Image (cartoon, rainbow, N blue to C red):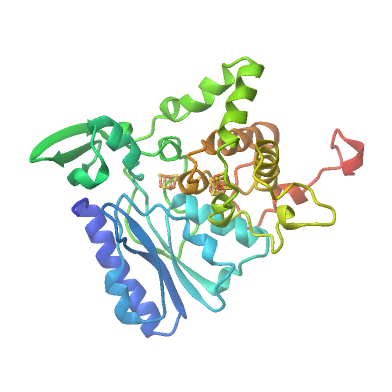
């Protein structure tokens, strides 16, 4: 698989070098990064104590996982690779006292955005397995398929969350692996799905979500990949009282997701992982991003920016409009 910018390659080499040095010098017990996946154009998380494994670390446009999800599970000092959105999730975990800043070394990537293979498949009319290679060069992506080259503007193939990313460079880091992000944003394009839903009459929108959540199989992948979903016991597993039926009926599926999204309000960094992980293809970002925008509009708060700030849902002011809060 070939899809590396010169910049990616330089960052990758520096990452391998820094990660190895951190383990050798005993500054961390584990490194968490990405290694090539078993399928074309994929990567998979690499968690290792072995300095020789650091030569497998990669940086490319397919490093989708938000690795901060592992921080609440691994005991010891950890060196972690973080894109802009991941670094904000780490800050959010520090704010919630789930992670101790001194226990982690953040290897930050100034992120140029990630490539959405579904968009590429739609554009070239081929399955990802049929593609020879994908080359990204600034604001252009060239796809080689059956010996032919096809070029597209980068904005047409990035994930929607990347297209509206305000903080592609890590907000907190110990080692920065590159200088600046070359991300090309298009906020209007990234909001298309949400705008379409907002423009629907309420009955049609309700029908849309009813249809979507009738496909939910309650696998909880959306919860498992989310660093903001860190409760030891999730409300869906409570039996006394039972808030939501464990049976995957659309009403309970919808209720599960609505409550999950309220729980991550002020913590969600629009990393896009829940939507990517959903095997039913439910457009979860239309809900999470809408919630992020409401949090910003109502509370002037963006998740994961200030590690010393109290978490949004624990802060109140004496001038709050609602009595019950004071
Ligand atoms: S949301 Fe921003 S930081 Fe996260 S992967 Fe996309 S461009 Fe990179
Ligand atoms: S990942 Fe998708 S199918 Fe699985 S529980 Fe979440 S919404 Fe349902
Ligand atoms: S709710 Fe989804 S987009 Fe938000 S932090 Fe969790 S996985 Fe990322």
Q: Is 316 on the left or on the right of 18, as rendered? A: right
Q: Quadrant of the N terminus?
A: bottom left
Q: In which quarter of the image is residue 116?
A: top left
Could you say where residue 186 lies in the image, as x and y percent from the top left?
Answer: 39, 30
- Can residue 171 be seen at all in this image of the molecule? no
- Can residue 111 be seen at all in this image of the molecule? yes
Residue at the spot 31% in from the left edge and 43% down from the top edge: 182
Q: Is 53 on the left or on the right of 325, as rendered? A: left
Could you say where residue 90 lies in the image, as x and y percent from the top left?
Answer: 55, 59
Q: Which of 92 and 282 is in front in this view?
A: 282
Q: Nearer the viewer, residue 78 or 151?
A: 151
Could you say where residue 145 lies in the image, as x and y percent from the top left?
Answer: 14, 40
Q: Quadrant of the C terminus?
A: top right
Residue at the spot 58% in from the left edge and 29% down from the top edge: 211
Q: Image height check: is 271 above or below 155?
A: below
Could you say where residue 168 lies in the image, as x and y percent from the top left?
Answer: 42, 46
Q: Image height check: is 243 above or below 206?
A: below
Q: Which of 277 and 246 is in front in this view?
A: 246
Q: Is 149 on the left or on the right of 316, as rendered? A: left
Residue at the spot 37% in from the left edge and 49% down from the top edge: 111
Count of marks overlaid on the render: 0
Q: Quadrant of residue 69?
A: bottom right
């Amino acid at each position: 698989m070939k899809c590396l910018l010169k910049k990616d390659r330089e960052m990758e080499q520096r990452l391998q070098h820094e990660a190895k040095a951190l383990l050798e010098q005993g500054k961390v017990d584990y490194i968490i990064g990405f290694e090539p996946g078993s399928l074309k154009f994929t990567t998979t998380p690499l968690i290792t104590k072995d300095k020789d494994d650091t030569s497998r670390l990669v940086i490319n446009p397919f490093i989708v996982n938000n690795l901060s999800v592992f921080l609440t599970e691994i005991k010891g000092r950890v060196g972690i690779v973080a894109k802009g959105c991941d670094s904000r999730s780490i800050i959010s975990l520090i704010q919630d006292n789930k992670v101790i800043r001194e226990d982690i070394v953040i290897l930050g990537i100034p992120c140029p955005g990630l490539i959405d293979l579904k968009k590429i498949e739609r554009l070239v009319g081929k399955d990802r397995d049929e593609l020879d290679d994908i080359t990204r060069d600034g604001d252009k992506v060239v796809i080689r398929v059956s010996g032919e080259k096809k070029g597209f503007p980068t904005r047409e193939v990035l994930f929607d969350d990347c297209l509206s990313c305000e903080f592609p460079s890590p907000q907190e880091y110990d080692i920065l692996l590159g200088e600046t992000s070359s991300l090309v944003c298009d906020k209007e394009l990234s909001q298309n799905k949400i705008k379409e839903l907002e423009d629907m009459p309420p009955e049609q929108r309700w029908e849309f979500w009813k249809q979507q959540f009738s496909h939910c199989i309650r696998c909880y992948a959306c919860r498992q990949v989310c660093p903001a979903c860190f409760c030891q016991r999730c409300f869906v597993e409570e039996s006394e009282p039972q808030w939501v039926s464990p049976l995957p009926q659309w009403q309970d599926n919808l209720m599960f997701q609505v409550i999950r999204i309220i729980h991550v309000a002020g913590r969600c960094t629009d990393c896009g992982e829940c939507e990517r992980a959903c095997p039913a293809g439910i457009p979860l970002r239309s809900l999470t991003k809408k919630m992020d925008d409401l949090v910003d509009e109502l509370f002037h708060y963006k998740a994961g920016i200030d590690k010393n700030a109290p978490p949004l849902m624990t802060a109140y002011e004496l001038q709050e409009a609602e009595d019950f809060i004071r």
